[in-house]
Image: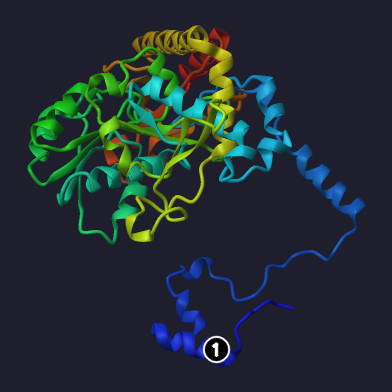
């Protein structure tokens, strides 16, 4: 039987108070095309033995990914994850841990989160980082909201179209019921944010300027130029990163005037896994720490003078009065942050840079090979002349679907059509995003180019 805690009379009172005629009216915003009035036609119950046979048959239909080469990216990158990471994540102390309220019983978890904060602060060049966010999109939104709280009643945020479309969509969703204006600035012919248009869009009503680098098309942006434009009008500069390996070879946002850095850290030890779980990050200048969302782990001394870790700034609803909370984030991605921390600790400074150099070098080799094929009559060329890290866009003279189908037939996941993540951008409909990592081999790249050059 269904568990409905309220009686019909109580439900009538509740509906009357909120001004709804029926329970169905509460769900009126659900599109009729996906609204079910009848339960799904599920098969009859089966025994455990039968279910195991069904599941085994379904599993047998899966492709063996180890036999494929992948050039997927667009915000999620298939980097190598050390074998010990997944094993240590299974330890009960980490796997089942919740918020470490009781510091004396949670030193392991608190230490791991503190190390995550340290890694993020060092990579971004910032003074302080919080105990992680859900994922990159909501981290970007929280950075914008944080900037607004610090802005003293300004009303406009200016963001580049180079920020990932999913981040921009999340921002518009969050701000739908706020009196804030979101202004987008187009990219120039080199694939970077149009500097003149950015400067023209920022004025005294602007509280934040948002930029992503490398941007959604893989092109490296100029942090300093965006920061200078923002600061000239008294606004804060927000830098988003969704491929954090790039920070091992590119200038850190904190070293180029950015005030708040945010984005996605899943490249460190977290497989793409159909889009999640992920781990966001947010870091800022020390002067802004009182407005940072979520909470921080800090290092302290116990009663006997020993080093200890504990939750320090916790500006979320569970810890302080709602009207003083900076956000409604109710947890951190502790397990995923631990995966990132272990991966970074294993790589170390040299391993991190070596991985980044491999990604950059392979991407440059890939771009050169595609350009040579295009000069010989191939249908795809590098779309933008701007500098890139491990990802770039191809402009295809044939339908992108034809290119992907030809590659798939050869066991290659050929990339992400830009129109899939930004269908409203007509000028990007013929673009294909391709990405490489340290797992990509030269043979993979050569095979990719050989297939593409023959597509008609």
**Residue 182 pos. (x, y %):** 21, 48
In this view, the residue in front, 207 or 417, is 207
Corner quadrant of residue 282: top left
**Residue 350 pos. (x, y %):** 49, 6
Residue drawn at the location 46% of the way across and 37% of the way down:
132
Residue drawn at the location 89% of the way across and 54% of the way down:
48
Seen in the picture, residue 379 relative to 364 is either above or below; the reply is below
Residue drawn at the location 69% of the way across and 28% of the way down:
88
Q: Is residue 195 left or right of residue 191?
A: left
Residue drawn at the location 57% of the way across and 9% of the way down:
443
**Residue 271 pos. (x, y %):** 59, 30
Seen in the picture, residue 190 relative to 175 is either above or below; the reply is above
Judging by the rendered image, the residue that carries numbered circle 1 is 10
Q: Residue furthest bottom?
A: 9
Within-10-Å neighbours for mark 1: few <14, some 14–19, many 20+: few
In this view, the residue in front, 428 or 52, is 52
Q: Is residue 141 visible?
A: yes
């Amino acid at each position: 039987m269904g568990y409905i805690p309220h009686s019909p009379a109580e439900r009538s009172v509740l509906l009357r108070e909120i001004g709804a005629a029926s329970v169905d009216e509460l769900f009126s915003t659900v599109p009729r095309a996906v609204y079910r009035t009848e339960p799904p036609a599920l098969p009859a119950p089966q025994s455990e033995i039968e279910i195991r046979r069904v599941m085994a048959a379904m599993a047998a239909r899966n492709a063996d990914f180890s036999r494929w080469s992948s050039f997927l990216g667009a915000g999620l990158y298939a980097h190598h994850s050390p074998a010990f990471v997944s094993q240590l994540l299974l330890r009960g102390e980490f796997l089942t841990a919740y918020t470490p309220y009781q510091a004396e019983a949670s030193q392991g978890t608190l230490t791991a989160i503190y190390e995550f904060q340290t890694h993020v602060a060092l990579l971004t060049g910032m003074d302080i980082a919080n105990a992680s966010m859900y994922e990159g999109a909501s981290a970007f939104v929280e950075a914008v909201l944080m900037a607004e709280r610090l802005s003293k009643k300004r009303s406009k945020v200016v963001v580049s179209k180079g920020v990932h479309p999913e981040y921009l969509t999340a921002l518009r969703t969050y701000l739908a019921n706020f009196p804030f204006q979101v202004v987008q600035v187009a990219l120039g012919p080199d694939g970077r944010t149009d500097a003149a248009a950015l400067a023209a869009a920022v004025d005294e009503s602007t509280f934040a300027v948002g930029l992503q680098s490398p941007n959604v098309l893989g092109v490296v942006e100029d942090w300093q130029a965006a920061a200078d434009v923002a600061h000239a009008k008294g606004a804060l500069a927000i830098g988003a990163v969704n491929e954090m390996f790039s920070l091992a070879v590119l200038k850190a946002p904190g070293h180029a005037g950015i005030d708040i850095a945010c984005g996605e850290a899943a490249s460190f030890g977290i497989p793409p896994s159909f889009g999640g779980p992920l781990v966001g990050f947010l870091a800022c200048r020390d002067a802004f720490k009182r407005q940072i969302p979520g909470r921080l782990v800090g290092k302290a001394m116990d009663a006997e003078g020993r080093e200890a870790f504990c939750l320090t700034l916790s500006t979320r609803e569970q810890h302080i009065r709602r009207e003083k909370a900076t956000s409604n984030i109710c947890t951190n991605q502790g397990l995923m942050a631990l995966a990132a921390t272990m991966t970074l600790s294993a790589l170390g400074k040299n391993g991190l840079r070596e991985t980044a150099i491999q990604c950059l070098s392979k991407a440059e080799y890939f771009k050169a090979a595609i350009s040579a094929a295009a000069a010989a009559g191939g249908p795809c060329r590098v779309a933008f002349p701007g500098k890139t890290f491990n990802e770039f866009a191809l402009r295809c003279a044939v339908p992108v679907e034809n290119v992907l189908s030809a590659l798939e037939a050869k066991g290659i996941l050929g990339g992400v059509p830009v129109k899939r993540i930004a269908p409203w951008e007509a000028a990007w409909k013929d673009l294909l995003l391709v990405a490489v990592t340290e797992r990509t081999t030269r043979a993979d790249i050569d095979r990719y180019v050989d297939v593409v050059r023959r597509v008609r």
